[in-house]
Amino acid sequence: MKRIALLGMPNTGKSTLFNRMTGGAARVGNWPGITVDLLSGHILLGGDMVEIIDLPGIYDIHGFSEDEQVVRHFLHDNIPDLAVVVLNATQIERQLSLLLQLRQYNLNMVVLLNMADEAKKFGITIDAAKMTEALGIPIFLMSAKYGNGYQDAVHAIGKALRYNTPGMAENLRSQLEPETHIEEEMSRVLDHAVQVPARLPDNLTAQLDRLMLHPLLGLPIFFGIMYLLFQGIFFFGQPLQSAVGDFFNWLRELLLAPALSSLPPVIQGLLLDGIYNGVATVSAFIPIIVLFFLFMAIVEDTGYLSRAAFLMDALMSRLGLDGRSFVMLLMGFGCNVPALMGTRVMRSRSLRLLSMLVIPFSLCSARLQVFVFISAALFAPGSAALAVFSLYLFSFASAILTALIFKRHFQNNEPFVLELPPYRFPTLRQMWLRGWHEVYHFVHRASKFIILGVVFVWLLTHLPTSATPAGPDTWAGHVGAWLHPLFEPIGISAELTIALIFGFVAKEIVIGSLAVIYGLGGHALSHALAIQLDWVQAYSFMLFTLIYTPCLSTVATLRSESKSIRFTLLSLVWSLALAWLTSLAFYQGARALGY
Amino acid sequence: MKTPEFTHSLSDLAPGESATIVSIQTDDALRQRLLALGFRAGKHIEVIRRASFSGPLQVRIGTTDILLRRQEAAKITVNKP
Ligand SMILES: Nc1nc2c(ncn2[C@@H]2O[C@H](COP(=O)(O)OP(=O)(O)OP(=O)(O)O)[C@@H](O)[C@H]2O)c(=O)[nH]1
Ligand SMILES: [Mg+2]
């Protein structure tokens, strides 16, 4: 099968093009370094199946960072039949250098000058035909986001795939051209075919940035936006979650319970109290997930992440981190795994490791589910959202404290240089793709180890059959009693201890486990929790859930990205210790104050 | 007639000031990255703003905006007309 590789500088729209060509759901965002790994898809092109590979962006062919090495290794191991080079048309003046470097590699190439829509807005005119002539490579203007020029581009790709037109066959070219030569060549091509206005018109981006990056207002605005976003998610998402939960309960009473009533009680219990309650309670969070990732998609695509890096770099540098580490913390609010992988753009290993040590404290969407549920059950409507927001503050505080403690061991002097892209806004299609993809991901997880998890919890809390369910004589009861000395000082009961143990696998299981342990779902579970716990215990439980290991996938990613078992263990042990100490300080402190 | 020109480091420029890049004195890796971002001798560069608390600078070369720390900016020599 023929292979097409998408090459180009970061943030030029390779993944957007990949999604358009394959109908896939590669992650897109207005941040250089969203894609850090290979992703392949298949399409039918001119009657043949071809493979398309989306690659991380590269600035030049000598790059040293991990994501750039992914590209080098890929090109080294399998020469693609066609390299589609995606350049940002608005930045053609500088991005041409990459094309000229690639031209030395004797690749079959088609060049797409993407973001033609923006180039037009900026008053940049490019004569693609003249450029084609000057370089001897087919060059097309297009917009991967809106589709202008896309048909012509696909046509050219199909043609180039059939009639191989290797770029520079001469062996002389196999030596790297000196930069001076590249500069001469760049101006030769550009003078010929490109016109850029001397000064960019004062556009929306410049106007917005005067406010968003304001020396005094910038940071307050940043925290204000975050506060509003999380309030919004709680405000719209929590009622939806609770309504869906009640709907599942209603379905159970109306249909499932009568239908299964002929089965033996143990099987009925396993199916209804175990699997159904657990999975239904977890599934009720789908609306929140969708809402959350719609917000995330918007934040990521506006380009505000780079602004956050600008605003926070000063503070981060004092913690031994940089603005990009902060952006990865923000990305971790969605899921810690891609955020950990996103550190591949950093060249210094120490900086990468220190960033990876703090990212797991980022309050991911799975933990958010636990906090939304418990806060709504235990706190008055007005203060519930505040309780969740306070956990975000604890999330930052844990990251900051960790960096302060460990920065001496991970010293680095990595330079901080980052592009600041213009503000953009996702299309409905892009938002829909992202939301759908996350729901798919969630259901996928739910159908695998969440079901497995709740079945385990049910067995542990109901066996042996002679014991009262979830009582002290069950297996779970024994485990809880054994761990009691550790969890009693932080106000966490035996039942909750079991939920925490399973939460190690994935945080979605925590609420599922509680549903199984109490044999209740939806509102009924909330009531049961409100009776069993006071707010101090609940908050201590949430603090522990926030700070200890997020999930097994995170541990596996820490291991594979750091390639060090020692580092992975350090991360595990430190987060457990910090979780326990924080909960202890909070619980004992609150009790001492008489709460 | 040749106008007098004064050599500065990029980190000395105030927001709103612009200059021409003369040379880049960094290690090879950073140099490569800066070249790819458009930092080349003879290019026009403008400082757009500086972050509070000695944070990074925002500069503009052509149509690209770039953030860089003061330490890095100090390694770039510019000519102010
Ligand atoms: N205006 C405009 N924006 C585009 C176009 N194509 C992509 N974008 C936006 O550009 C940003 C970057 O797109 P991606 O597809 O993630 O870019 P990428 O090249 O895969 O980036 P990396 O994975 O970081 O290397 C996103 O905000 C896209 O929505 C286009 O044709 N026009
Ligand atoms: Mg990408």
Image: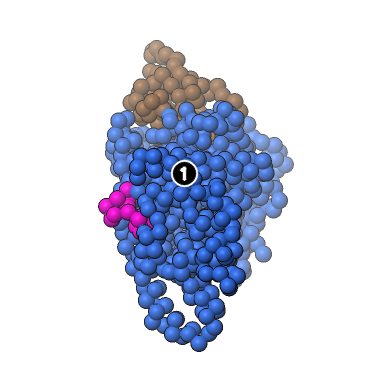
Chain colours: A blue, B brown
In this rendering, is residue A431 above or below A302?
A: below
Q: Which residues, given as a range, are shown in magenta?
A: A374-386
Residue A505 makes an appearance in the image: no
Report crowding for label 1: few under 14, some 14 to 19, many 20 or more residues within 10 A (C-alpha). many
Question: In the displayed structure, does residue A277 sit left or right of residue A453?
Answer: left
In this rendering, is residue A567 above or below A388?
A: above
Residue marked by disc 1: A583
How far from the left and from the top, in percent, is residue A561? Answer: 62, 45
Tell me which amino acid carries mark 1: Ser
Please report the residue visible at 29 percent of the width from the left and 54 percent of the height from the top.
A380
Please report the residue visible at 48 percent of the width from the left and 39 percent of the height from the top.
A399
Along the line of sight, the residue nearer the viewer: A397 or A319: A397
Give the secondary structure at mark 1.
helix
The question of residue A444 being in magenta is answered with: no
Please report the residue visible at 64 percent of the width from the left and 59 percent of the height from the top.
A3
Name the quarter where the N terminus of chain A is drawn: bottom right
